Amino acid sequence: MEIKKSTTEIISNKWKEIEELKREGIDPFGHSFNRTYKIKDLIEGNKDLQIGECGKEKVSVAGRLMALRTHGKAIFADIEDISGRIQIYVKSNKVGEDAFKLFSKIGVGDILGVSGLIFRTRTGEVTVFVEGFSLLCKSVRSLPEKWHGLKDV
């Protein structure tokens, strides 16, 4: 049986996460980040990449974390900016163990910037292979429900 947390509980837990990050010396707000592309432009500029092929240019994009999938020492996630959505791939041996542990504390709704090479996965999805990232803003509230407020008439 799934118990839904109240908004107050969720916000309280998020503030605890923020305080924990601060104790570890990580500022959860107010960073600057130089992105080189909007997500839509990055995807369109790499539409000719073949499966398994990697781009030659290091790219930087920023957006809100919309989905997160952990697979042991690898994490797939989706970030979204105003122009579109892209998958990112974070691997512990690429970013380092400390950075990987930090990334594990990032949640859906947080805003981050990532840098790395672009590649096309086996499933054909254009993806950023993350070499570095910055937490730009830790979210305090959950994202709204996708269909909140919609009713059949």
Image (tube, grey):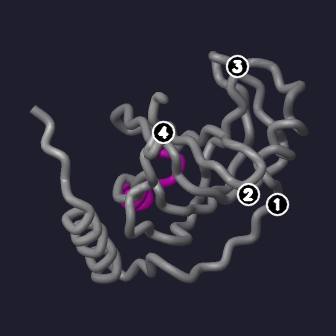
Say what amino acid the circle numbered 3 marks.
Gly
> What separation in Å lies between label 4 and label 1 (alpha carbons)?
37 Å
Residue 60's disc number:
2
Task: Name the residue beneath numbered marker 3.
Answer: 124
Task: Name the residue beneath numbered marker 4.
Answer: 150
Q: Nearer the viewer, residue 101 or 27?
A: 27
Q: Secondary structure at mark 1?
A: loop
| First along the sequence among labels 3 and 4 | 3
Residue 79 position (above or below residue 125): below
Q: Quadrant of residue 18?
A: bottom left
Residue at screen point 72% across, 27% down? 120
Q: Quadrant of residue 36?
A: bottom right
Where residue 59 sits: x, y (%)? 77, 53
- Tag 1–tag 2 contact (CB < 8 Å): yes
> What separation in Å lies between label 3 and label 1 (alpha carbons)?
23 Å
**Of the residues tagged 2 and 4, which is closer to the observer?**
4
Say what amino acid the circle numbered 2 marks.
Ser
Is 120 positioned to the left or the right of 111 in the image?
A: right
Residue 25's disc number:
none
| First along the sequence among labels 2 and 3 | 2
Where residue 46 sits: x, y (%)? 86, 34
> How would you rate the neighbour count of disc 1 (Cα within 10 Å): few for under 14, some for 14-19, many for 20 or more?
some
> How would you rate the neighbour count of disc 3 (Cα within 10 Å): few for under 14, some for 14-19, many for 20 or more?
few
In magenta, the rendered stretch is 91-103
**Of the residues tagged 4 and 1, which is closer to the observer?**
4
Residue at screen point 63% across, 17% down? 123
Residue 36's disc number:
1
Residue 77 position (above or below residue 105): above
Q: Secondary structure at mark 4?
A: loop
